Amino acid sequence: MNEFVCISSALYPDNGEPIQIKIDLLDHKSGVAHLCKGFDISPSDWPDGYGISNEIVTLSTHQGTHIDAPMHYYPDGSDIVAADVNNFIGNAVVFTDKSNHEFEIEIEWIDFINKLEKYKNKAKAVFFITGAYKNYGHKDYFYNFKGIPEKYIEAALDLGFSVIGTDAFSVDPPFAVMSKAFIETKDQSKLWPAHVLGRKKNYFQIERLCHLEPFEHCNLVEFIALPVKLHCGAAWTRAVARIIE
């Protein structure tokens, strides 16, 4: 049996995120002084003169590898705590985009549907590998990536899949691309179509998967991506996966 490997992106300050990640560190020297306050203990009484460290982290629930719940798509949607954890443990069908399309993946429709039909009783998620993960850590990752057309997601949901995963910054194309399309057409469906789809067909998105080299040529993986238990529309996850087929 193949071992699980981490498919999550790491979080760190100055990683190019549009919203900066901030980490305030209480190091081991500062920690020991803090712990001694109010007690008849001095820092030198601690083994090695060290206390314990702590970090105060400021970041969005949508930074790093995270899971979006229906609450993210519309006000009456359920939050991540309400989700059945079994949604995030199981198998995922894998599609790797090989098209030259600039801002959206493109997969042969018949091949896509046939593969979903083949695995619909063996999997609950669909993972799309767009190649974006290779740019993680660079600013370009956040502004130049491929979205997943609504029709692919809706077809997967109609066949019983409940989780959609991507290695890109978002399931939808870059905001600048969607905004331009809307301004040119005044068509509201151009704005966040994959997210808005979640208003009528509830599903979960795993965004910003990473380290996907081993999975680009497989069909089926087993994954675990349990979200942190927050009463929010999204939560971080340490996702892992291994090849099944």
Image (cartoon, rainbow, N blue to C red):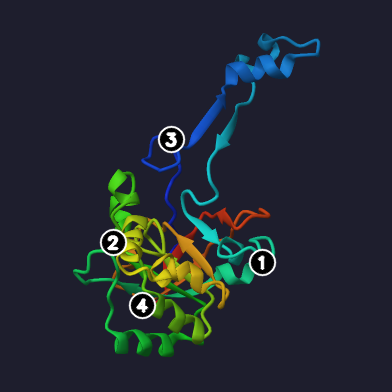
Q: Check disc 4: other Cα within 10 Å, few if <14, some if 14-19, many if 20+.
A: some
x, y percent for residue 239: 49, 58
- Residue that appears at 38% across and 71% down: 187
- Residue that appears at 39% across and 35% down: 14
Q: Check disc 1: other Cα within 10 Å, few if <14, some if 14-19, many if 20+.
A: few
Amino acid at the residue labelled 2: Gly
Dot placed on the residue nearer the N-terminal end, 3 or 4: 3
Q: Which residue is mark 4?
A: 219
x, y percent for residue 148: 37, 70
Q: Nearer the viewer, mark 3 or mark 1?
A: 1
Q: Which residue is mark 3?
A: 13
- Residue that appears at 44% across and 84% down: 155
x, y percent for residue 193: 43, 70
Label 1 to label 2: alpha-carbon separation: 34 Å
Mark 2 touching mark 4, by CB under 8 A? Answer: no
Dot placed on the residue nearer the N-terminal end, 2 or 3: 3
Label 2 to label 4: alpha-carbon separation: 16 Å
Dot placed on the residue nearer the N-terminal end, 2 or 4: 2
Q: Report the disc number at residue 131.
A: 2
Q: Nearer the viewer, mark 3 or mark 4?
A: 3
Q: Which residue is mark 1?
A: 76
Label 3 to label 4: alpha-carbon separation: 35 Å
Label 1 to label 4: alpha-carbon separation: 35 Å
Q: Nearer the viewer, mark 1 or mark 2?
A: 1
In the depicted structure, whether residue 26 falls above or below residue 149: above
- Looking at the image, how many numbered discs can be counted on the residues? 4
Q: Check disc 3: other Cα within 10 Å, few if <14, some if 14-19, many if 20+.
A: some
Dot placed on the residue nearer the N-terminal end, 1 or 4: 1
Q: Looking at this view, is 121 or 42 the one in front?
A: 121
